[in-house]
Amino acid sequence: GAGVSQSPSNKVTEKGKDVELRCDPISGHTALYWYRQRLGQGLEFLIYFQGNSAPDKSGLPSDRFSAERTGESVSTLTIQRTQQEDSAVYLCASSFGGGVNQPQHFGDGTRLSIL
Amino acid sequence: GQQVMQIPQYQHVQEGEDFTTYCNSSTTLSNIQWYKQRPGGHPVFLIQLVKSGEVKKQKRLTFQFGEAKKNSSLHITATQTTDVGTYFCAGPRSGYSTLTFGKGTMLLVSP
């Protein structure tokens, strides 16, 4: 497919467990973003990768959150020791080139539910 | 931190009525983007405005960027049920290479 692909689409886990979310950006897109969207809320920026530059981690809410990206391809967002407040939809987006002028293309998100 | 404020949070209109959502920033923005998110869907890019006083149209949608580049609006003429969703504006985060999104305006259209 040509779009941003995220997996799993849904994840239910118990409080305290670790979770790993995956994002496959559009081929050729050098920039990749992770956002968190709580129910009925806006998009909360988490982290930004652009090419080989150091990632912008300024939006990560705590040290339980981390993300990796392999080159200009797949990214994984890891949440350790999950808490109930981590329940949300996690959206990944990619863009052709970084910066604030590029349109972002979003995946369908991973709906994370912490019991 | 720098924020982009959107009003109203929610609007319910009858099909055929007009709709406007407003986006305001306390600082000057180099550009502003608008996205639409259908219920259960993901945000989809609509348009970007860059110039002071810029006006762009997409069929029944009219986008404006204020003269001072601190505010923007999206106006929909004669709404249709297909316009249902949440409309987000996004502007550059001060000091960063990323965008900050407004909280969105949820539009509900009754037939």
Image (tube, grey):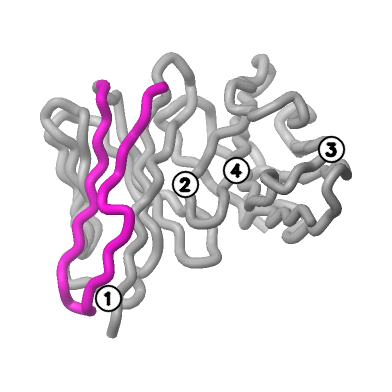
Q: Which residue is drawn at 84% across and 54% down?
A: A13
Q: Distance between the residues labelled 4 and 1?
A: 29 Å
Residue lying at the far bottom in this picture: please name it: B111
The answer to whether B105 appears left or right of A24 in the picture is left
The residue type indicated by label 2 comes to Gly
- For the residue carrying disc 3, how many other residues have a C-alpha within 10 Å: few (<14), some (14-19), or many (20+)? some
Number of the label disc, if any, that sits on residue A81: 3
Camera-near label (1 vs 3) is 3
Residues in magenta, as a range: B1-27
The residue type indicated by label 1 comes to Gln
Q: Distance between the residues labelled 2 and 1?
A: 23 Å
Number of the label disc, if any, that sits on residue A36: 4
Q: Position of residue B11 (x, y in %)?
A: 27, 64
Q: Position of residue A77 (x, y in %)?
A: 75, 37
The image quadrant where one finds the C terminus of chain B is: bottom left
The residue type indicated by label 3 comes to Arg
Q: Mark 1 points at which residue?
A: B80
Camera-near label (2 vs 1) is 2
Q: What element carries label 4?
A: strand
The numbered mark, 2 or 3, whose residue comes first in the sequence reads 2
Q: Are marks 4 and 1 in contact (CB under 8 Å)?
A: no
Q: Does the magenta stretch include residue B20?
A: yes
Residue lying at the far right in this picture: please name it: A17
Q: Are marks 2 and 4 in contact (CB under 8 Å)?
A: no
Q: Which residue is drawn at 21% across and 40% down?
A: B72
- For the residue carrying disc 4, how many other residues have a C-alpha within 10 Å: few (<14), some (14-19), or many (20+)? many
Q: Is mark 3 on a helix, strand or loop?
A: loop
Q: Which residue is drawn at 22% across and 46% down?
A: B22
Q: Mark 2 points at which residue?
A: A42
Q: Which of B82 and A51 is in front in this view?
A: B82
